[in-house]
Image (cartoon, helix red, strand yellow):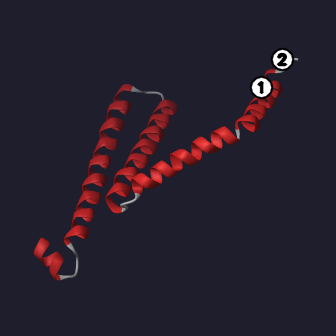
Amino acid sequence: MADWLQAHGLSPELENKLLVTAITVGVLWALNRIVLGIAYRNVTDPWSRYRWRKAVTYVTLTLGIVLVGRAWFIGMQTLATFFGLLSAGLAIALKDPVANLAAWAFMVWARPF
């Protein structure tokens, strides 16, 4: 099959990326089904099942994006570092507005005065 793919213009590097992507998607899909199967067996409340399904789906989707992104994009580590530093800078720069917003929400909801 590798010879057929290379004869039709796919490089070995692209074949490896496609293989890693297919394996990652398959493993994450199976993991999602297994975890949800265990959760559905142990949880009977529909609302709890819904939350489990949403949480597991979001975790597997995020994990899939990260793993497939690492296979396809060489600079993924640099991008992750950039976003980490950007979020830290925004947290420091917006500390006072966020604290003021939290204090306002506390005063509106709890009515301490």
Residue 73 in view here: yes
- The front one of 27 and 50 is 27
Question: Residue 90, how many percent across, how many down?
Answer: 64, 44
At x 22%, y 81%, the residue is: 9
Q: Are marks 2 and 1 in contact (CB under 8 Å)?
A: yes
Looking at the image, residue 33 lies above or below residue 49:
below
Query: For the C terminus, which image quadrant?
Result: top right
Q: Which numbered tag is attached to residue 112?
A: 2
Q: Tell me the residue that label 1 is attached to.
A: 106
- Residue at 37%, 32% in the rendered image: 40
Q: Position of residue 18 (x, y in %)?
A: 26, 64
Position above or below: 11 against 17: below
Q: Is residue 45 left or right of residue 4?
A: right
**Regarding mark 1 in the picture, which secondary structure is present there?**
helix
Instruction: Using residue 52 as the reference point, say whether residue 12 is left or right of it.
Output: left
Q: Is 17 rendered above or below residue 88?
A: below
Of the 4 image quadrants, the one containing the N terminus is bottom left
